Image: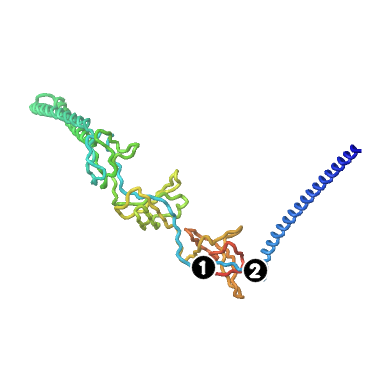
Amino acid sequence: MKKLTQISIALFTTVLIASCGGSKKDDAAGINDKKAALEKLKSDRTKTDEEIKKLQAELEKLDSNSANASKIKLVAVAPVTTQDFKHYIDLQGHVDAENISYISPRGMPGQVKAVYVQQGQYVKKGQLLLKLDDAIAQQQVIGARQQQEGIKTQLAFAKNLYQRQKNLWEQGIGTEVQLITAKTNVEGLEDQLKSAGEQIKLAQEQMKLSNVYNDVNGVADIVAIRVGETFQGMTQAGPQIKIVNTSNLKVVTNIPENYLTRVKKGSLVEINIPDANKKVTSSISLISQSIDATSRGFVAEAKIPVDAALKPNQSAIMRILDYAAANAVVIPVNTVQSDETTKYVYVLTKLSNGKSVAKKIAVVIGEVYGNNVEIKAGLKAGDQLITEGYQNIYDGQLISTSIL
């Protein structure tokens, strides 16, 4: 009997546990179903809200009397005016001198025997700067002179012989051939003496080549040569002697080839030299006749007044005027917007009921410089251009203005 009771209790416990486990599974399934249903409702509500907003925006554009149309946008406007419009090409340039001389020997490179110039010294045109080794040239002069003296001695002897032969011929002694031979010897030696004189002059000129002279008035900007060194003018390290004449200064720049038809000799130039705090107005004085194969540009120069504060190779900014229009319609470039077909702006328009609305105006733009753009067509002086708040408005929207 006791054993039967134990078996009954065990069966009851098993049934109870199975009953509780099934209840928990049913509860979990119900929670998941409710969560899924809730997420679906939220998703449907989001889509519905988006559709409502879209329909409200479309209704607002179509129905000016709708409740949403009462939301007036605040904008700022400014009257359109006309003014002189100028377009510049902004380029980087540098100061240069008209007369810069890189001194070089007139003959072959030679060893320096004496230096007569110091860096920073003012030198005149024709002034002696260096003395090169001229020992060989001196020997050539001495040899030419010795040769000349020998020819002079031979010529004196030949003349004396010719005169004697001539006297004998006049007395009927001797032959005509002897006389002619004596005369020919004299003439030949005279020619040799003349040639020897030319050789002396040539040797003397060769000796003068050892003197290195200055060819422009200016300041010795570079003197990189010493006694005993070989002077050849230009080395891999640069010029050995450089003379700069700052009495004629200019600013040089390289202009891209796409501006070739827009820049010409005489074009106005505004020059700014920041390091010297100098501003100069000038004009293009020279345009190169070829396009550089590497930079794809051409060189332009503009002369500037002499100034002690300006140095060659100093940085300069050039603003070349390449376009100008008088009484042009000019507006801020940021007010111009674009769509698939055109460029446009918004202007303020007054309705018959006194309300103000934004009107979309297609425009034709011209040149752009800085923050301004030239308007060729679409706007006229007096139009009220929307300059602030134009990004979030549409054609026909009610607006409230703040007049600038």
* Nearer to the camera, 152 or 92: 92
Q: Which numbered disc, 2 or 1, marks the residue closer to the eye?
A: 2
Q: Residue furthest bottom?
A: 353
Percent of width and height locating residue 404: 50, 69
Q: From the image, which quarter does the N terminus lie in?
A: top right
Percent of width and height locating residue 292: 43, 45
Q: Quadrant of residue 262?
A: bottom left
**Helix or strand or loop: what does disc 1 sit on?**
strand
**Helix or strand or loop: what does disc 2 sit on?**
helix
Percent of width and height locating residue 208: 22, 37
Q: Quadrant of residue 41?
A: bottom right
Q: Residue furthest top?
A: 174
Q: Residue furthest front?
A: 2
Alpha-carbon neighbours of circle 1 within 10 Å: few (<14), some, or many (≥20)?
some
Side of 76 relative to 303 (left or right): right
Q: By what rule are the colours in the image chosen?
A: rainbow
Side of 16 relative to 233 (left or right): right
Residue type, mark 1 in image: Ala
The residue pinned by badge 2 equals 69
- In the image, residue 393 sits, relative to residue 253, either above or below, namely below
* Nearer to the camera, 293 or 154: 293
Q: Earlier in the sequence, mark 2 or mark 1?
A: 2
Q: Residue furthest left?
A: 171
Percent of width and height locating residue 317: 40, 53
Side of 21 relative to 376 (left or right): right
Report the disc number at residue 50.
none
Side of 218 relative to 95 (left or right): left
- In the image, residue 293 sits, relative to residue 202, either above or below, namely below
